[in-house]
Image: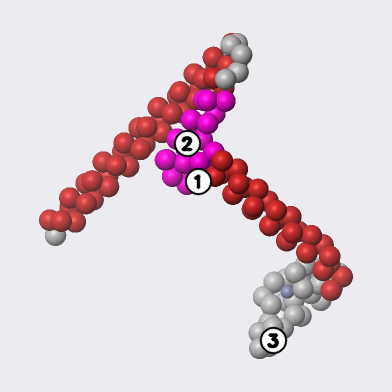
Amino acid sequence: MHRQCAFRSAIGKPCRAAPLRDGEFCLMHSPERVKEVQEARRLGGLRRRRESTISSAYQFDSLNSVEGIRRIVEVAVLDTLSMENSIARSRTLAYLAQVALRTLEIGDLETRIADLEESTRIKK
Ligand SMILES: [Zn+2]
């Protein structure tokens, strides 16, 4: 049989999560694990704040767009360029150049597809 967390909200709505193996509540609602959950939440909050500070320092948004990927490659190139010259540095730069080239190609395709979509929409 499918076990369910015994927690009920103020309006009596059940929690849909599976309970812990040795209890009747899920991790979030287990009275014995409150400290643990609070600590995890606190760490999650700290991490999110830290992530947002770092992304604004590097003007980096996310890897979800070509622009974001381009930015991260730029940061890596600048960091690598500032290192002392070596074969490893040259290899890294050559690799980053390849990634950048691929990103440029995909960005170009994205723009062209968007333009095409826009032009077909007008004709309808
Ligand atoms: Zn629960």
Q: Which residue is outermost to the left?
A: 123
In percent of the image, x 73 and y 61: which residue is there?
Answer: 41
Q: Which mark is in front, 3 or 2? A: 2
Q: CA distance from mark 3 to mark 2?
A: 46 Å
Left or right side of 14 for 109: left
Q: Please, what is the dominant secondary structure of the magenta stretch?
A: helix
Mark 1, residue position: 61
Residue 54 on image: x %, y %: 60, 43
Mark 2, residue position: 71
In percent of the image, x 47 and y 36: which residue is there?
Answer: 71
Is residue 68 within the magenta segment?
Answer: yes
In percent of the image, x 60 and y 46: which residue is there?
Answer: 53
Q: Hey, what amino acid is under mark 1?
A: Asp
Q: Is residue 75 above or below residue 40?
A: above
Q: Hey, what amino acid is under mark 2?
A: Arg
> Based on the displayed image, in which of its 4 quarters is residue 83 positioned?
top right
The answer to whether residue 3 is seen in the rendering is no
- Are the residues tagged 1 and 2 within 8 Å (C-beta)? yes
The mark found on residue 10 in the picture is 3
Residue stretch in magenta:
58-79
Label 3 C-beta lies within 8 Å of the nearest ligand 1 atom: no
Q: Nearer the viewer, residue 60 or 122?
A: 60
- Are the residues tagged 1 and 3 within 8 Å (C-beta)? no
Residue 50 on image: x %, y %: 65, 48
Is residue 101 within the magenta segment?
Answer: no
Q: Which mark is in front, 1 or 3? A: 1
Left or right side of 5 for 67: left
Residue 80 on image: x %, y %: 57, 22
Q: CA distance from mark 1 to mark 2?
A: 8 Å
Helix, strand or loop under label 2: helix
